[in-house]
Amino acid sequence: MATTDDSFNGMTEHCDHCDLETLHEVSVQIRTESMKEENSQFSREPYRVSECQQCGHRTSQRMNNA
């Protein structure tokens, strides 16, 4: 779970790679999931991307699992 603190950019979360609570840069990316060109416009999904600022480990999670 992400928390905020008084640090610059303020998001800390548990990093599985460091096994610590570290500062993370968190963003949302829209990714195209279909490889078929004619359907790609209908297959875009939001992903939450989190990158540990200490070790650089990156994780992503699909946000719309409908």
Image: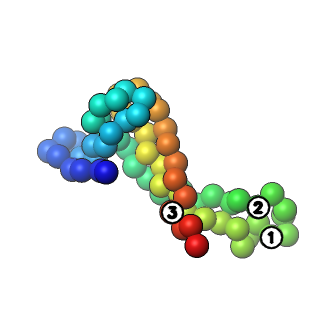
Which residue is depicted at the point 65% across and 66% down?
Answer: 44
- Look at the numbered disc 2 and give the secondary structure of its residue: loop
Tell me whether the residue at label 1 lies in contact with that at label 2, contact meaning CB atoms closer than 8 angstroms: yes
Tag nearer the camera, 3 or 1: 3
Please tell me how crowded label 1 is: few (under 14), some (14-19), or many (20+) other residues with Cα within 10 Å. few
In the rendered image, which quarter is residue 13 located in?
top left
Asked whether, in this view, residue 63 is left or right of residue 35, the answer is left
| Amino acid type assigned to the residue bearing label 2 in the image | Ser
| Quadrant, the C terminus | bottom right
Crowding at dot 2, Cα within 10 Å, few <14 / some 14-19 / many 20+, comes out as few
14 versus 56 height, above or below: below
**Residue where numbered disc 2 is placed:** 34
Residue 36 image offset from top left, x and y in percent: 84, 62
At label 3, which amino acid type do we have?
A: Met
Q: What residue type is labelled 1?
A: Asn
Residue at position x 76%, y 66% from top? 40
Query: Circle 1 is placed at which residue position?
Result: 39
Coloring scheme of the render?
A: rainbow
| Mark identifier at residue 63 | 3
- Vertical arrangement, residue 28 with respect to residue 11, above or below: below
Location of residue 5 in the rendering, given as x and y in whole percent from the top left corner: 17, 46
Query: How crowded is the residue under tag 3: few (<14 C-alpha within 10 Å), some, or many (20+)?
Result: few
Locate residue 28, reporting x and y percent.
Answer: 48, 57
